[in-house]
Image (tube, rainbow, N blue to C red):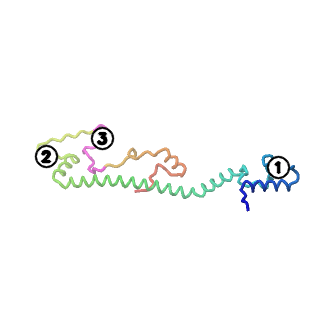
């Protein structure tokens, strides 16, 4: 029995199809002259259909619904992160002042530190010394210092928020002027 190749099998299939069709002549049965079958609209798969104008509308509507649903959670998260940053900044400021006070206490525990503090803050002088106090024009106090030794942070010491942070504050309705957490 002789084996047939795939080319021979394909050729025999083509000849049987054309012979059964009856409308074409035997000489015109080559595959080059055959036209592909015309597909109806129902036979075109959904993957090949162009997207309608409603697809962008549905996408925009989905994004809007997601934004509306997630806004409260995102707002709370943003407020919490701002509050955390504020508390961390206050903690760093308090730790810095704690270190300054600890250093001042250690200095006051020595006789030299007590003498220096009394001279600087209270205006004391040793026997035979004269003390001159120079008061600036706008100041009316007769004592050289206020005695506390602790400096407080002013509004100029606070960091300036970035443009992005200002926009997020506006978007989420966070008041920038008031601190997030009261001390």
Q: Which mark is residue 126?
A: 2
User: Residue 83 placed where, x, y %?
Assistant: 45, 55
On screen, residue 80 versus residue 106, left or right, reads right
Q: Nearer the viewer, residue 136 or 155?
A: 155
Give the residues in magenta. Answer: 136-150
Residue, disc 1: 29
Q: Quadrant of residue 66?
A: bottom right
* Residue lying at the far left of the rendered structure: 128
User: Residue 113 placed where, x, y %?
Assistant: 19, 51
For discs 1 and 3, the disc positioned in front in the rendered view: 1
* Residue lying at the far bottom of the rendered structure: 1
What SS does tag 3 mark?
loop
The residue sitting at 40% across, 55% down in the picture is: 88
What SS does tag 2 mark?
loop
Q: Which mark is residue 139?
A: 3
For discs 2 and 1, the disc positioned in front in the rendered view: 1
Check if residue 145 falls in the magenta segment: yes
The alpha-carbon separation of the residues under discs 2 and 1 comes to: 128 Å
On screen, residue 128 versus residue 101, left or right, reads left
Which numbered disc flags the more N-terminal residue, 3 or 2?
2
Which numbered disc flags the more N-terminal residue, 1 or 3?
1
User: Residue 182 placed where, x, y %?
Assistant: 42, 56
On screen, residue 36 versus residue 177, left or right, reads right
User: Residue 159 placed where, x, y %?
Assistant: 41, 46
Q: Which mark is residue 94?
A: none
The residue sitting at 19% across, 48% down in the picture is: 116
What SS does tag 1 mark?
loop
């Amino acid at each position: 029995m002789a084996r047939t190749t795939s080319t021979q099998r394909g050729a025999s299939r083509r000849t049987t199809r054309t012979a059964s069709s009856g409308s074409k002549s035997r000489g015109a049965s080559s595959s080059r002259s055959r036209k592909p079958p015309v597909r109806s609209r129902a036979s075109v798969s959904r993957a090949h259909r162009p997207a309608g104008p409603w697809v962008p509308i549905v996408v925009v509507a989905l994004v809007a619904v997601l934004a509306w649903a997630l806004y409260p959670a995102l707002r709370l998260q943003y407020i919490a992160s701002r509050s955390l940053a504020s508390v961390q900044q206050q903690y760093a400021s308090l730790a810095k002042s704690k270190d300054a006070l600890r250093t001042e206490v250690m200095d006051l525990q020595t006789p030299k530190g007590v003498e220096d503090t009394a001279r600087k803050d209270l205006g004391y002088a040793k026997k035979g010394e004269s003390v001159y106090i120079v008061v600036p024009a706008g100041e009316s106090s007769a004592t050289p210092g206020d005695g506390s030794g602790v400096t407080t942070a002013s509004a100029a010491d606070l960091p300036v928020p970035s443009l992005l942070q200002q926009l997020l504050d506006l978007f989420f309705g966070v008041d920038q002027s008031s601190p997030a957490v009261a001390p």
